[in-house]
Amino acid sequence: MRVRGACEGMFAIRDRMRRIEDFRGLYYGKVLDWVGVLPAESLHQADGTVLRTWRENGYAITLRFDGKDCCLGVWEERDGLNSVC
């Protein structure tokens, strides 16, 4: 897993997620270990993929996983605070 510099702050999920340069190829268990909390939502898609969303204080990120729990990448990321590190 490649990790980049982080901006420290009160937004633990956002800060942790932004340290990962590329989610593709990471397994769900590894993402959970890194983030430290379960996703707020998991949506099972008809094609067998799962969209998992983590939320915190205006920030949300959704990752798409295949049927074997391997991440296919970021589906959507929103930062309602528009903060810049």
Image (cartoon, rainbow, N blue to C red):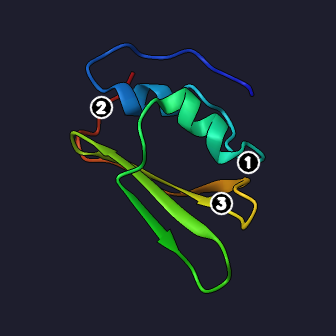
Question: Horizontal and vertical percent for residue 37?
Answer: 41, 36
Q: Amino acid at mark 3?
A: Phe
Image quarter where the C terminus lies is: top left
| Mark 2 → mark 3, Cα distance in angstroms | 27 Å
Return the mark for residue 52: none
Choose the circle earlier in sequence order: 2 or 3: 3
Choose the circle earlier in sequence order: 1 or 2: 1
Name the residue at 71% across, 65% down: 66
Above or below, 83 against 50 in this view is: above
Question: Horizontal and vertical percent for residue 25?
Answer: 78, 46
Q: Answer left or right for 49 relative to 11.
A: right
Quadrant of res 84: top left
Q: Secondary structure at mark 1?
A: loop
> How dense is the environment of label 2, judged by Cα within 10 Å: few (below 14), some, or many (20 and up)?
few
Above or below, 83 against 73 in this view is: above
Q: Which residue is mark 3?
A: 65
Q: Amino acid at mark 1?
A: Arg
